[in-house]
Amino acid sequence: MACVSLVVAGCSTSEWRDVKNVTLSPDGRTLTVRVLFSRPPSSPEPCERVAGTMVEESASTVVIGVLVDEDICDRPWPWEEPTMYETLAAYAHPVRLRLKAPLGGRVVVNAEKTVAVKSDVPSPGSLPE
């Protein structure tokens, strides 16, 4: 029993996910990122979970990160492996990151790459008159 527990516990891994899509709240203090998770074929529960987040702010940049634990679900036996099309399933999981100060003109960076930020606030030209 102890050997089985050790083997299962050692199977999951954690990684910092590359964040590509970020949405800014109307007050400028919350960034919402969407992280893609896979689903096991027989369950709506994800095989990943958010293990941690990082927000480091300076006067010119905001560095963000989302740490994900992977392979936390029961996987099928090799002879029960899902088909290629079943493994392509994924869904976006929103993760909210709170800023100490409004984003303003600062640049959002993830893994040393600049991230495009979409605002929830409509631009002045798009408002109906």
Image: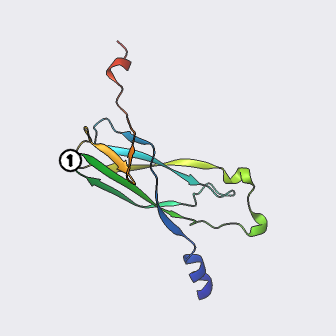
Q: What residue occupies the far front of the structure in this picture?
A: 112
In percent of the image, x 64 and y 49: which residue is there? 89
Dot 1 amino acid type: Ala
Mark 1: give few (<14), some (14-19) or many (20+) Cα within 10 Å: few
Query: Is residue 40 positioned above or below 61 on the image?
Result: below
Q: Quadrant of residue 81?
A: bottom right
Left or right of residue 81, residue 124 in this image: left
In percent of the image, x 55 and y 54: which residue is there? 37
For mark 1, what is the residue?
Answer: 59
Where does the image place residue 125, in percent across and percent down from the top left? 35, 18
Query: Is residue 115 positioned above or below 77 on the image?
Result: above
In percent of the image, x 49 and y 66: which residue is there? 14
Q: Quadrant of residue 107?
A: top left
Left or right of residue 79, residue 103 in this image: left
Element type at mark 1: loop
The one of 43 and 88 positioned closer to us in this rendering: 88
Where does the image place residue 53, in percent across and percent down from the top left? 38, 58
Left or right of residue 13, residue 61 in this image: left
